[in-house]
Image (spheres, helix red, strand yellow):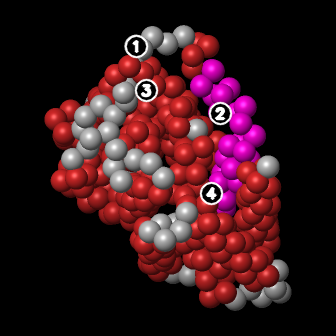
Amino acid sequence: MPIKNIQHKAIPLLTVMLAALATLSPLAIDTYLAAMPIMSDVFGVHISVVELTITLYFLGFALGNFFGGPLSDSFGRRRIALFGIALYGLSALGISFCKEIEYILVLRVFQAFGGGFATVTANVFIRDWYEGKQVAKMVTIVSLMMMLAPLFAPVIGSLLIDFKGWQAVFHFLFIFAVVLFSAFFIIVPESRSKELITKKVTRNQILDKYREFFSDRLSVILLFAISFSMSGLYIFLTSSSFIYIEYFGIDRSLFPYLFGANILLNILLSFLNTFLLKRYRPRYILRAGLLLELIAGIIILVSVSQAEPELWWVFSGIVLFIGSLGLVFGNGTAVILNINPKVSSSANATIGISRFLLSFIIGSVISLFKAENLIPIGSAMFACALIANILYAKALREANK
């Protein structure tokens, strides 16, 4: 049941607000991808320089998560979210007026910091308002919106670029931020108890929040189990064009459909998760999701190890792998947050930072292999699923102690 005296009729509207908050960064990345070749020509630089705006966004987002979580404990969730949205929107507007690529690189860090600052509060709002199974249910809904955004963002970006050039993408992001800021300011109440909002923060306060989280052995094991599980997704994202277009020779026009199948199954299993939570605890569904991911990893590994891998076996394994995360991330986040209610914002930030950094490192390492086959990719995805299951089994043993 909802807590903190939130009226039942307000729950759907608040859910929409938090889901919109979670889509800030997917929109900032995926609406922008189609503009990169154009910006390379406009600014007279190699496209690798423009690609730095994506890399730096990830860096800024991780930093925003790192500081946003603990600061929301001291200053309140609502204030931190509003500040992050404002910084995100103003940075997007500033980018649209830039005449030099160097200024865009700097502003993208600020935009990402604002996005991370705001987004980290979404799950913390949920943890403040809900408890038990409801946390997993609400986190799954927010995660679902994050998965839907990449389906529509590239289409929106292409239409905007055709209509008004690359600047239109950032005008759209600015307008989205203005609307979200206004709605958030009017609709969303503070979820942090007044007596816990100290409005004071020191270096030790920030670090102590993370020290408290990492001092709990069970939380750390679960954190890495979830992070390794999600790393397989980033390996696929890094290698998807090579797998389907270069290796199997699929026509580029079919690529969005093959890619979209992963998102579709993930969404379906996320919906299934909301029903399963009515009967089962999040940790049991999480275990099922990790086992499903391991089965998918085995299918992928066996398929790519063949002398001539079959497209549909590889495709099926990948779809099952990415789809299984619909049962993993929401429940994994809920389990960790429920273990650490006193430092829920720092715990949530740690999940985001660790998941991103580990996934980014593994995905980057895999991209360095210029192999002519799919074995490195398949082996890495299988390894991530296997390690995630081993760590979760270890976490269960730790919990039983």
Q: Which residue is more in the foreground, 53 or 324?
A: 324
Decide whether the magenta segment is chiefly helix, strand or loop.
helix
Give the Cα distance between marks 4 and 3.
26 Å
Q: Is residue 163 left or right of residue 270?
A: left
Q: Of the residues under marks 1 and 4, which one precedes in the sequence?
A: 1
Give the Cα distance between marks 1 and 4.
35 Å
Q: Identify the residue at horizontal 53%, vertical 32% (top origin).
A: 342
Residue 35 visible: no
**Please, is residue 44 above or below residue 212 in the view?**
below
The residue pinned by badge 1 equals 199
Q: Which residue is more in the foreground, 155 or 39?
A: 155
Closest to the camera, between mark 1 and mark 4, is 1
Closest to the camera, between mark 4 and mark 3, is 3
Q: Identify the residue at horizontal 29%, vertical 59% (top origin).
A: 156
The residue pinned by badge 3 equals 72
The circle on residue 230 is 4
Q: Is residue 208 magenta-colored?
A: yes
Q: Which residue is more in the foreground, 252 or 174?
A: 174
Number of numbered tags placed on the structure image: 4
The reply to whether dot 1 and dot 2 touch (C-beta < 8 Å) is no
Q: Identify the residue at horizontal 63%, vertical 21% (top origin).
A: 208
Name the kind of residue labelled 3 in the image: Ser
Snapshot quadrant of residue 327: bottom right
Residue 2 visible: yes
**Please, is residue 70 above or below residue 178 in the view?**
above
Q: Of the residues under marks 1 and 2, which one precedes in the sequence?
A: 1
Instruction: Give the extent of the magenta segment.
Output: 207-232
Q: Position of residue 20 (x, y in %)?
A: 31, 49
The residue pinned by badge 2 equals 213
